[in-house]
Amino acid sequence: IPAIAHGHDFYWERERYQSNRILDLLDRAFPPSLPSLQHVTINTIARDRLQDRRHIESTIIPNVFDFSRPPGGVDAYSRDLRQALGLQAQAPLILQPTRVIRRKGIELAITLVKRLSLAQPDLFIPHSASDEGLNYWHWLEREARLMGVRLHLIDQLVSTSRLKRGGRKMYSLWDIYPHADLVTYPSLYEGFGNALLEAVYFRLPVVVNRYPVYNADIKPLGFEFIELDGFVDDHSVSAVQDLLADPQDSREVLDQNYNIAREHFSLEVLESKLRTVLGSF
């Protein structure tokens, strides 16, 4: 059966999968090299390592987003979101739109919030903390408490769609982004960076850690973000302070980021690349 093998995450890319009893089987058969398969990877690093380890050629198709359709804004349903989060009118909503797992580097976001001159030093996380156990979350809670940062896990208010659960109003993730003033994305490792594309789609400023795939496939395209290099330095703190003080000053850069993403990571790009792969069978 002709098929496309979409190699989103390989076992050798995750430290916790390195110790197992079937390494010989994994190295021999995963992913399989078959004449009926056309392989797709999501970044140049994965493509090169798949070639080196398994002698399998692949086509790069990155994560994409529907950039041809402008995002929605704040409406009657989502207007009370900031109130639901307990934010004062002028307090910035700083969003860490990731799961709570170690490779997301959330401790860097906490350090950044600590160093900003904020009356309300809050950081909001809309996703679950239980995907890989709660040890990392409990450590983050302790670090945030010691630094005087209020860390909010708001997954109990977020659903895949708008609804009411147990008498409580639930918001979608798309309701939260339009309220956000800053997105923190200090990941240590990402296969690509879905949340980064989402932030660009909503024309939001982003603080990003220079993880390997970002350096290889995203930064060279011309995006402009506030960058970290594994730690929070004075320059990044100053840049965020300036941005929060005058959000309109970054409007041109945010529009430029949107246009770059539309050119390289749109559904139209996906269609074109998929047609090429399908045509190669």
Image (cartoon, rainbow, N blue to C red):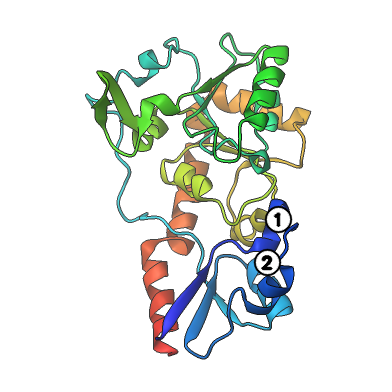
Residue 11's label in the rendered image is none
Q: Position of residue 31 (x, y in %)?
A: 59, 74
Residue at disc 1, secondary structure? helix
Q: Position of residue 42 (x, y in %)?
A: 55, 65
Residue found 68% across the figure and 74% down from its top: 25
Residue found 43% across the figure and 90% down from its top: 281
Name the kind of residue labelled 2 in the image: Ile
Residue at disc 2, secondary structure? helix
Compared with 88, 8 (above or below) is: below
Q: Position of residue 270 (x, y in %)?
A: 41, 68
Res 121 seen here: yes
Residue found 41% across the figure and 61% down from its top: 266
Give the camera-side residue of 251 and 153. 153
Where is mark 1, residue-wise? 212
Residue ranking furthest to the left: 76
Give the camera-side residue of 118 and 248. 118
Where is mark 2, residue-wise? 45
* Label 2, label 1: how far apart the Cα atoms are: 8 Å
Tell me, yes or no, whether the two marked residues, 2 and 1, touch with CB atoms within 8 Å: yes
**Label 2 Cα neighbours within 10 Å, binned few <14 / some 14-19 / many ≥20:** some
